[in-house]
Image: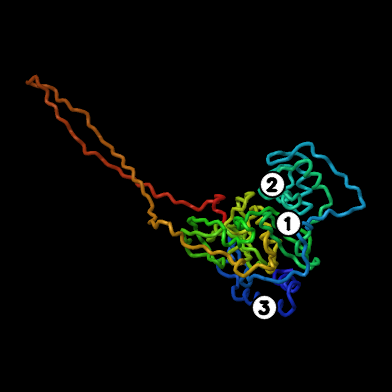
Amino acid sequence: MNNRQHLHSSVSRWLPAGAAGGLLAAVVAAGVISGNGGDETSASSTTVTASVATPVSTEPVETISPEDQIVTESTDVAIQKTALDRSLTEGVVGDDVRAVQERLTELGFDAGPIDGIFGSLTEQAVWAFEKLVMGVPRSDATGRVTAEMWDRMQDPIAIQPRRPTGGLADHTEIYLPEQVMIVFHGDRPALVAHISTGELAVGADGFTPWYDNAAEYCETVTIDTDDNGNILEEAIEKAICGRSYTPPGVFEAYKTIQGRRESRLGGMYDPIYINQGIAIHGALNVPLEPASHGCIRVSQYLGANLQSMLDIGDRVLIWDGVTEPEQQSEEAMKMRWDYPDPNATTTTSTSTTTSTTTTTTTVVPQATVAPTTTPTATTSTTTVPSTTTTSTVPATTTTTSDDPSDDD
């Protein structure tokens, strides 16, 4: 099934027939207009474009509370559990690590290659399991597999969506307080991942909107594509400030770009856009705490796979832990755009050229004329002008790095 066929199927399950048909027509028109031509179809940056993201606010048919989301299914077959005789943490290796990786993968938590090596990808999968299944507060997650956790991991666990579709549609759910994302195919978890989003800044009363309290950041960014994903002829450097805010609500995936993009929010790998400039994307740095400028970070490894798991038109629901996604206001669902840094100092960038001067002096030995009739020697000195050689060293060129701090 191609993206357009899947879009019609996915949208028609969520909307009345007339509305679904209208939205599909808009998407098809957008695809014809864009043509997917020019630089957007280059090997380094391929863009698939649909209509501009529009927040969707529809009352759910069925809801499942966070407390009821994790179910231990009954079974007539006795479960043969194994015991863990040591705690597992990043850096250890062994068959017990491989067993944990296999079980996490079965449950939908992608722990990276199943190789018996407890690396950062396995640690992130364990973080997600701790927070979602074990109920550990995000700040208390350890990334350590204890004997107790391994025992729980072997239970017949089922992870349900908070917005089930009856198995009729794919969608993604993002839980900001837990910093966890789940991609559901039908109502089954195809991927459960640890994420890092904008900072959590709920007011002390627990109800003040996040966008009024989101932490401010100020930095100089390099932008090589515009807000529609089109590559600029020349990269732009700007000193900006912004709010680290990930809007909650109901949205739809509307565009993908392959490769790395330098946006006003920062560097992004393989972004899937869901709300104006907000995207789910791969990143080099996905810490335990919220750290992005507003996007939803996953590991670069997962980011490269996500575009095959989400289709254009798939619904994305984001919980803030205070208000249900469908009940968020239009203002709350808006991305907070950046603004010029008022404290930035305008300077002229000048390349530095270093000149090295080497002076070579030739000295002729003193010549002595043999005496004739006078006892006094006549001495003559010949001076050769010094030769000066100058060589110029070209200015050094600085290129953009993949430093984790460049992530959005």
Residue 353 seen anywhere in this rendered image of the structure: yes
Cα separation, mark 3 vs mark 2, equals 46 Å
Residue at image position (74%, 77%) is: 16
Residue 141 image label: 2
- From mark 2 to mark 1, how far is it between C-alphas? 19 Å
Name the quarter where the N terminus is drawn.
bottom right
The disc at residue 25 is 3
Tell which residue pokes out farthest to the front in this image.
Answer: 205
Q: Quadrant of residue 23?
A: bottom right
Q: Residues within 10 Å of mark 2 (few under 14, many from 20)?
A: some
Tag 2's secondary structure? Answer: loop
Residue 380 x %, y %: 14, 29
Q: Measuring from the top left, give residue 63's x and y in whole percent.
A: 77, 65
Q: In the image, which is nearer the foreground, mark 3 or mark 2? A: 2
Residue 38 vertical position relative to residue 131 in the rendered view, above or below: below
Q: Which mark is drawn over residue 191? A: 1
Q: Nearer the viewer, mark 3 or mark 1?
A: 1
Query: Vertically, is 356 above or below 336?
Result: above
Q: Amino acid at mark 1?
A: Leu
Disc 2 marks a residue whose amino acid type is Ala
What's the residue at 21%, 39% (across, down)? 385
Q: Helix, strand or loop at disc 1?
A: strand
